[in-house]
Amino acid sequence: MIVGTAGHIDHGKTALVKALTGTDADRLAEEKARGITIDLGFAYADLGGGTVTGFVDVPGHERLIHTMLAGAGGIDLALLVVATDDGVMPQTREHVAILDLLGIGRGLIALTKADLADTARRAAVTAEIRAALEGTALADAPILPVSSLTGEGIDALRAALIAAEAETTARHADGSMRLAVDRSFTLSGAGTVVTGTVLTGRVAVGDPVIVSPRGLPARVRAIHAQNRPATEGLAGQRCALNLAGEAISKDAIHRGDVVLSPTLHAPTERIDAWLTVLPGEPKPIGTWFPARLHSHAVEAGARIVPLSDPIQPGGSGPVQIVLDRPIAAAIHDRFILRDVSASRTIGGGRFLDLRPPARKRRTPERLALIGAARAEDPGAALKAMLTVAPVDLPAFARDRSLSPVALAGAIRDAQAATIGDLAISPAVLDGLQAQLTATLAQFHEDNPDLPGLGRERLRLTLTPRLPKDAFLIFLRAESDQARATLDGAFVRLPGHEVRLTPEDEALWHRIAPALSGDARFRPPRVRDFATDFGIDEREVRRVLRLTQRLGRTDQIAHDHFFARPVTAEMVAIIRDVAAQSPDGWFTAPAFRDRVQNGRKVAIEILDFFDRHGLTLRRGDKRRINPHRADLFGEPGRESSPVGRPDFNSGWGSETVPGGFDSHSLPPSSEGHA
């Protein structure tokens, strides 16, 4: 258990810690000379319960509230100190407000310097404390009179701490590790050491870590947990880590940095949060309100942007926090806001989204996501967020420091469906499937002559809009269930076939005879058909492109279409010509002589095969690419769909294993001698 002191300056916090532990938490010469705590102090002791309790002693001076905040993060129990001679003072009230904003609901109240007060004074101060605690999480905390000088009440306070220790639930240590750094120093013979509270997970000797937000890689050389040598440190423990790394030094690591597992390193300078403003704030929090943000040990300048109306004193609401520098944080980390002059605490709350947009931050969807993220249980938060939008699971787990087991549990509790790394609600998945079917059906009805709807156009049509990788996984799953068919870069409903209108079919029957027979290797061009039939050239080209999609033709050149069986026949001729060459390389004239057409047409045909990777060209010679030799079928059989417009469509296409792309040079001739 980690106990954090709180209270006004000179109310006896450090003396009380020494009476309980025997350790003087004031470690600086200036602190001892002035008799006040200036920086954080630490003490450890077995109070009698068999475990080591850690104490974080914080300064009580109003100018050192930022230091108090650095020590308040990560404590399990607050030990609020109020002196009987002074009673409740300004910093007492501010510390109480801070503890309440940090969500610290477990605490004990030590009525110090009890030897200086009679029964009436003790009763009066007790009543004053109860009034100050009214409405806070510490309202019912026990109040124990103590005297560090005479020893009165010390045993009773120690017993209360032992009981609280027994009731302290161990924090979950199965997530990724985060340690908030509050000190960095150098030890002779050891090197750089950082101390802080392990917020989540566990860390072991030898573990690789990152010092965030700067991203300094390091390795853990040694560990002290609760002031004792250890092989690992667990969530909830104060640990000292001896770090080693090329960029690691005392001056490279600062209070407020976080040592964490490498997978968690993702600094942010823009955070959506839920803010509660203290009732004593003089005016509402409006847009671009300047403040100082404190979270665990970090302090940074910030601007506050309410995401709805300005937040009134005593009110709460969603805000976006724009920081002046990146920090390492996690969702549900608590924070405190103070004014820029460091004279008062404004309010505090919890982080809810570490990656919010800078624009459109007040949309209903954004506000709904922020509200959903307020649930502390990951499963409940995920379920609520899925009612608004799909959730990126790696980011969800990283920003919450969840282990794979915890993430799987959250997915199960949320009853979420998954598409790759994306979580989606079953209702939204059903809606996507229904939209897919309806969209494709409507497209086929409107465009019977097209093979299907392009993948990217389809992705942009459906709601919600999935990322490309997740959308492809979704399409493949739909294909596996026979609800859709992936056809190159197009998607169609099973059973859909491109069909010609009766008029187009009639024109094709007039063209087809000219693409076969003796002149099949030198068929008429599009403009020749248009002239012969007295039809617009664009209409002839449109119908021939439709027949290409149907697998009846191949567009060898812009104005030249060949029947699909003829394309396969020419491939067989190329194979034969290449086989007759000693090294497999052949020339264009050798092919031209076999098909008996002109040089220009022969070059067009060979360029077509070059583009699709069937042949590889070097200078004036070509050879068969064995890795793509199966792109075309044998004569008399339907050939591969290389001539279709979707063959080289880009997104979602697969690379042929071991093959060349159409721009690759072939191997040198020496390798084929």
Image (spheres, rainbow, N blue to C red):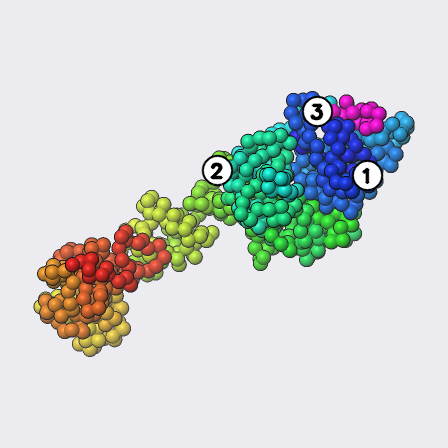
Mark 3, residue position:
47
Q: Could you tell whether 275 is left or right of 223 in the image? A: right
Task: Please state the horizontal and vertical placement of residue 251, each as a whole percent of the image.
Answer: 63, 48
Q: Could you tell whether 606 is left or right of 258 in the image? A: left
Question: Seen from this angle, which residue lies furthest front?
Answer: 189
Please name the amino acid that badge 1 sits on. Gly
Distance in Å between CA atoms under marks 2 and 1: 49 Å
Mark 2, residue position:
404
Q: Residues within 10 Å of mark 1 (few under 14, many from 20)?
A: few
Instruction: Determine the image quadrant of residue 144.
Output: top right
Instruction: Determine the image quadrant of residue 121.
Output: top right
User: Which comes before the other along the chain, label 2 or label 3?
Assistant: 3
Mark 1, residue position:
35
Q: Is residue 638 visible?
A: no
Question: Is residue 87 rendered magenta in the image?
Answer: no
Quadrant the N terminus occupies: top right
Q: Residue, x 53% and y 47% (percent of image)? A: 246
Q: Is residue 376 above or below residue 165?
A: below
Please name the amino acid that badge 2 sits on. Pro
Instruction: Determine the image quadrant of residue 297.
Output: top right
User: Which comes before the other along the chain, label 1 or label 3?
Assistant: 1
Task: Please state the horizontal and vertical placement of residue 436, each as a whole percent of the image.
Answer: 39, 51
Q: Of helix, strand and loop, which one carries label 1?
A: loop
Task: Please state the horizontal and vertical placement of residue 485, each as a whole percent of the image.
Answer: 31, 50
Question: Is residue 157 rendered magenta in the image?
Answer: yes
Q: Is residue 356 above or below residue 559?
A: above
Instruction: Please state the extent of the stretch shown in magenta in the rendering.
Output: 141-158
